[in-house]
Image: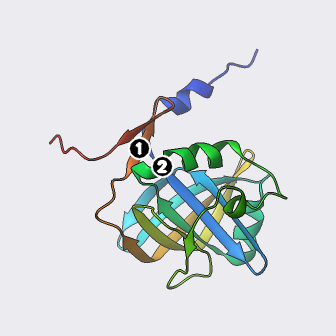
Amino acid sequence: MKKNLLPISRLLPCSVTFLSVGTKGKQDAMTASAMFVCEDPPLLTVSVSKQIISHDLIEKAGEFVLNVASTNQVKLARQLGFTHGREVDKFKRFNIRKEKARKVGSPLVKRSFAHLECKVITSLSAANYIVYLAEVVANKVENKLIPMAWFGNKYFALEEEIG
């Protein structure tokens, strides 16, 4: 009998990011959890389901943007986390405002705390996911906004230093 380990994923606090990716004529956004691997050069990992359009677009473009969500984007995080489909333009459906990136062709999601423009270095297949290792080639921070984290299936503002 196979054990259900789904609740394990709720034990690890994580950043809330919106992965945005676009190629000519197609774009997508999804919630994603990312982890820094190295600071110099700035490398990070992110996993993306093989079944969704973001995967196809990353494979084609070789790049994406990780937009670190701000506390004013909880509703958007929920919407993107529960909406899947190859025919849905989430930018239009959820009225996501975007702006042009400096070094990649994928769009930035406005009102995010930070934007990390990434170029894929390599990838690894893991179950039904692809884990991408990417280098951050440009970034932008909106210091007046507050980032958030996800833990125990809840969102938390990251604004108080405790140590």
| Residue 2 badge | none
Quadrant position of the N terminus in the picture: top right
Q: Does the residue at mark 1 contact the one at mark 2 (Cβ under 8 Å)?
A: yes
The amino acid type of the residue labelled 2 equals Val
Q: Residue furthest left?
A: 163
Vertical order, 87 against 15 (above or below): below
Q: Residues within 10 Å of mark 1 (few under 14, many from 20)?
A: some
| Residue occupying the point 41% across, 75% down | 139
| Residue occupying the point 58% across, 61% down | 19
Quadrant position of the C terminus in the picture: top left
The spot of residue 59 in percent (x, y) is 73, 70
| Residue occupying the point 65% across, 69% down | 21
The spot of residue 58 in percent (x, y) is 69, 69
> Residue tagged by mark 2?
16
Give residue 4's quadrant in the image. Answer: top right
Q: Residue furthest top?
A: 1
> Residue tagged by mark 1?
149
The spot of residue 35 in percent (x, y) is 46, 54
